[in-house]
Image (spheres, rainbow, N blue to C red):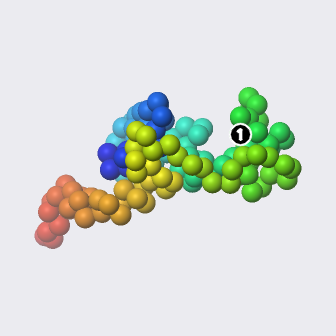
Amino acid sequence: MESMVPFMPMITGSFINTTCAASAAVQGSGVVYAAYGPQGRFLYEGKGMVDEQTGSPWARRGAKKVLVSQYGGKTRAKERLEYTRQAHPKAQAEWFEAAKKADEKAWIHLVKETAGGGKRG
C-alpha cells in the first residue's frame, strides 16, 4: 500500500485514506485494495465516466455511470482523466502497476523474508 501512495491522485487525501483503511481492515489476508469506494474504479482506470442519461460527470443520486466511450449522446467530459500532480507529481492511472514496477524487488525481498528467507526445508 505504501508503495502505491506516491502514484495515487490526491487533492484532499480522502480517497487515499479510504483506500488505506480498507486495505488495513483486510491486512494479513493477502488482499490489498488499490482503489476503494465509489470513485475507485474510474480513478484507477483513468477513464472518464458520466451519468448514463445526462452525460454529466456529476451523476444524479443513484444514477448509473458509464464510460464516456459508452455514452450515446453528446458530452463535454473527457475520455481520459487528467490528474492534478501538485501533491503527488507521479500521480497516474493504474498506480498499482507503477508501484510494482518501481518496488518489485523490495516486495519480493520482503515476502521472502516474511516467509522464512526463501529457504526450503
- Percent coordinates x, y for residue 42 in the rendering: 60, 48
- Percent coordinates x, y for residue 119 in the rendering: 14, 68
- Percent coordinates x, y for residue 80 in the rendering: 63, 54
- Where disc 1 sits, the SS reads loop
Whether residue 18 appears in this view of the structure is no
- Percent coordinates x, y for residue 77 in the rendering: 72, 46
* Badge 1 amino acid: Pro
Nearer-the-camera pick, 73 or 4: 73
Identity of the residue drawn at 16% across and 58% down? 113
Vertical placement of residue 48 versus 109, above or below? above
Identity of the residue drawn at 68% across and 54% down? 79
Vertical placement of residue 45 versus 121, above or below? above
Vertical placement of residue 112 versus 81, above or below? below
Whether residue 36 appears in this view of the structure is yes
Nearer-the-camera pick, 38 or 51: 51
Identity of the residue drawn at 80% across and 51% down? 71
Side of 8 relative to 68 (left or right): left
Vertical placement of residue 78 versus 36, above or below? below
